[in-house]
Amino acid sequence: MSDIIKLLPDSVANQIAAGEVIQRPASVIKELVENAIDAGATSIQIVLKDAGRTLIQVIDNGKGMSDTDARLAFERHSTSKISKAEDLFSLQTMGFRGEALASIAAIAQVELRTRAKGAQLGTKIMINASKCESQEPDMCPEGSNFMIKNIFFNVPARRKFLKSNQVELSNIIKEYEKLALVNHHVDFSLSNNDKLLNKFSGGSFKQRIASLWGAKVDQQLVPLNTDTSLVRITGFVSKPEGARKRNFLQFLFVNGRFMRHPYFHKAIISSYSELIPDDEQPNYFLNFSVDPESIDVNIHPTKTEIKFENELPIWQILAAAVKESLGRFSAVPQIDFDTTDAPEIPAFNDHTVVTAPEDGIDPTYNPFKPQSKSSAGGGSSYHPQSAGNFGGYSSNPLPDWEKLYQNFEKGKQEGIASITEQDVEDSFSDIGEVEPVNNGVQTEIITPDMSSAMCMQMKGRYILSPIKSGLMIVDQHRAHVRVLFEQYIKQLDATTISSQRVLFPEVLQLTTSQNIILKELEPEMEKIGFNLAQLSGNDWSINAVPAGMENVNIKDTILQVIDEVSMGGTSITTKVYESIALRVAKSAAIPYGKTMLQEEMDTLLSKLLCLPNPNYTPDGKTIISVLSNDQLEKMF
């Protein structure tokens, strides 16, 4: 039997590794910028063509590389960051695995021009799919200039799964924002197709937040600063009124590295308990500084999953720090008494004598004790039984209680005596025939009309209808959403929807990545009835909306469309149509708690059951459940 196990060529092994490290153009930018930061760069330029499909260029002014280092850097597991396994627990750099450049070179055409600090001459190296084609001396500035061309050109399956240019550019900007935020001391610039998208000068953490997301976000932040033996946490959290339903900005960094940590996220959210609605989340921008030996970043090649040795204590420190910041800066509401025009309250001291006001109340008075004529007429003027005076101060008491009770009993007996036997017979004539069952207990016998299956509404939420296989239970709101959704989709596909001008145009504030998506969506949005105009920066004016969307939250609708389109998948036109149709259908559908007539329930069910997929809403929620005959029999 011949041997079947073979050693993979380096080029194939690098392509396999690239599947984890390089997922899209944004991954290339992350790796190259982190390398530039490790090289001590204070200025980084990112130049794109076709959102990175054709070209990704990263230029830095770091310490550069010699000609030998430049060639060796593209070999797998080659790095200057560590030299032994123990170094993994004292990392001070972003990179350390030695996989990034080898992975990039395996799936693209790479040109590198670099010159080390103090060197007279630099070097230029050309690599094509892991194969070094040339290396020669070059006159270039100090630092490094990487040009990554035609990403995934030799892996067609991977290139096919790239999204549209706008979606890929949106993902690049999200990655760029993380890098620019944590490295706020570095100058950054980003351009695509010769158009400058962003440019920042080095500054403070708060200045970088304001530069990225505007002064409005900056004004809603309160600082957080706590220092313990385990961790130092600095940064900013938003006031409760700054919480959002979507577009929330949440960033956690540890030792200058972006991380995703659901456990710490929960600690922050718990600190806002009862301060914000359940469907909203706060913004936060927090930096953790810990001993490198107490964390493990070598979990995944992307290095965004971090394990902490002291997770529980840090969780408690973080939760307490957020609460303290919110309280210290009056983010938590406090009682504030209005002292305007308030009467003066005299100050009391040890010698002040307080005299109770005379109110004429006799504390010995007992309303249930027979009163003498003398006591009834004299003494205190307080009588709880007084008529015409709710305060109890009156000289006209009610008649004697015993006499009042006798009159009440007399009236009740006269009322009972006035009922005739005929009245009793008439009152039972409408109940129907009864027969003794269960040891003489009388029970009404109801014989329903089974000639037609009748629907019944339950708790203003469900419609119950008997079917051949058992009992069908339908969620009335979701059923109507499904019916309306199909109607709106047909209308959207048939013709251009008419617009309706809004009386007061609304301003929609977007992030840079959302702004790019909306620019691409604008023609389709106009086709379905929107009229949008871009203002300065990333702000848009909503001047008109599709007819029939009067009661819909327009801003939230547009933001949801942008989010869904940025996730990729179906074509933009289809995604926009489906998003608009679903939002309008949810707004116009029968609400829970509305009582429906028999005809309305019949019509809704007939329309629902004629649809190709009546069991689920467009967003995947169950509409119909059936209790089978067997299940019903087992119940009894």
Image (cartoon, rainbow, N blue to C red):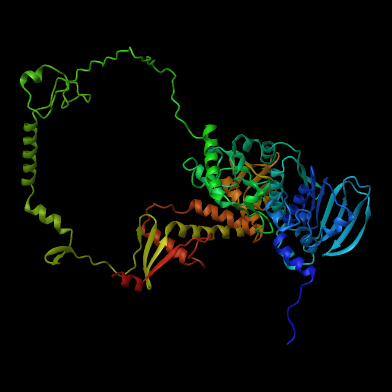
Residue 129 vs 506, above or below: the answer is below
Horizontal side, residue 482 vs residue 83: left or right: left
* Closer-to-camera residue (444/214): 214
Residue 518 vs 97, above or below: the answer is above
- Tell me if I can see residue 259 in this picture: no
**What residue is drawn where x is 6% and y is 42%?**
414
Q: Quadrant of residue 4?
A: bottom right
Residue 554 image offset from top left, x and y in percent: 57, 46
Horizontal side, residue 140 vs residue 453: left or right: right
Residue 356 vs 325, above or below: the answer is above
Residue 349 image offset from top left, x and y in percent: 36, 14
Image quarter (top left, top right, bottom left or bottom right) of the C terminus: bottom left
* Closer-to-camera residue (56/381): 56
**What residue is drawn where x is 9% and y is 37%?**
408
Horizontal side, residue 509 vs residue 43: left or right: left
Image quarter (top left, top right, bottom left or bottom right) of the N terminus: bottom right
